[in-house]
Amino acid sequence: MDSFYAVYLIIAVASIFSVMGSLFILIIYVKYPNLQCFAFRLVVYLSLFNFFESSSQLIPSYKIDPKMCLYQSMLNQFFGLCNILWTGFICLILYFQICEIQSNFVRNEKLYLLLTLLISSISIIIPVSFSSFGYVGGNCWIKEHELGNLFRFVFFFIPAWTVIALITIIYIKIIRTVQRESLLITEMTISSNRVISKLKMYPIVMIVGFLPLTVYRIFEVFIDPPIWLYAASIGFYTCIGFMNAVVYGLNEAVKDEVFKTYLKQDVCISMEDES
């Protein structure tokens, strides 16, 4: 089996899981009106970005023409950066809501979304202007050359690790705030523990997704790393959509709504059986 074809298979399998996870969040949002609130809408935006990025990864770039490769490169870069930036904005909104007790974050939703789309658009316009998109082995993205390496870090890895650092610091503050308030109100202990356990997962998801790929790209600047390292790193990164769906989507509100639906179905079935 061709090594690049094997890499594509790994990317495709991971992408399918991420697409399914993103679709789950979108379907849940449409199906249950009680979940169509501001907080879950933020997760829906993230799921949309993950869905389109994972879908673009399914394009078999190892055998497509240069024009199609350009389209895939642009989609990967645009929605990949949207994913990074929007994760950061979710973090900021949580911080303002819990620690600063501000209410204007709801009004700023469109501003945050506009900034995400604008910055991500700039990140594809500049590389396109310098013909820096192309096939990179397994999929299409910013090519490996002196200017391309600069674009990779400026438009992807630096924002990614900046957001990772940001959410780590802010989530520590949020966790401390929740713990402090739970000490004042003993009834909050169970719910606060759930919040804390969930918050701890947010930076972990990004670190698991971005660390292997970052290490690989750094190695790539200096040496020729083995293809299996690329396959592993891109596989972890592509699974971010699935991991986001699990961490952001499987909260208590979603579980309650799904449980109530199945409970109603069970009641209807039992009544039909009795009749």
Image (cartoon, rainbow, N blue to C red):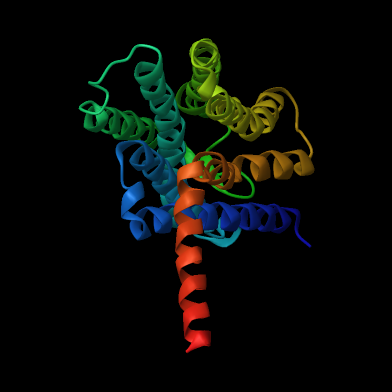
Q: Position of residue 184 (x, y in %)?
A: 50, 11
| Residue 205 image-quadrant placement | top right
Position above or below: 63 against 52: below
| Residue 62 image-quadrant placement | bottom right
| Residue 93 image-quadrant placement | top left
Q: Which is more toward the observer, 91 or 141?
A: 91
State the residue at coordinates (65%, 57%). 13
Position above or below: 235 against 198: below
State the residue at coordinates (49%, 28%). 156
Q: Position of residue 155 (x, y in %)?
A: 45, 26
Q: Position of residue 80 (x, y in %)?
A: 47, 38
Q: Is residue 72 visible?
A: no
Q: Which is more toward the observer, 76 or 129?
A: 76
Residue most extreme to the front = 274
Horizontal side of residue 1 vs 75, given as left or right: right
State the residue at coordinates (53%, 28%). 195
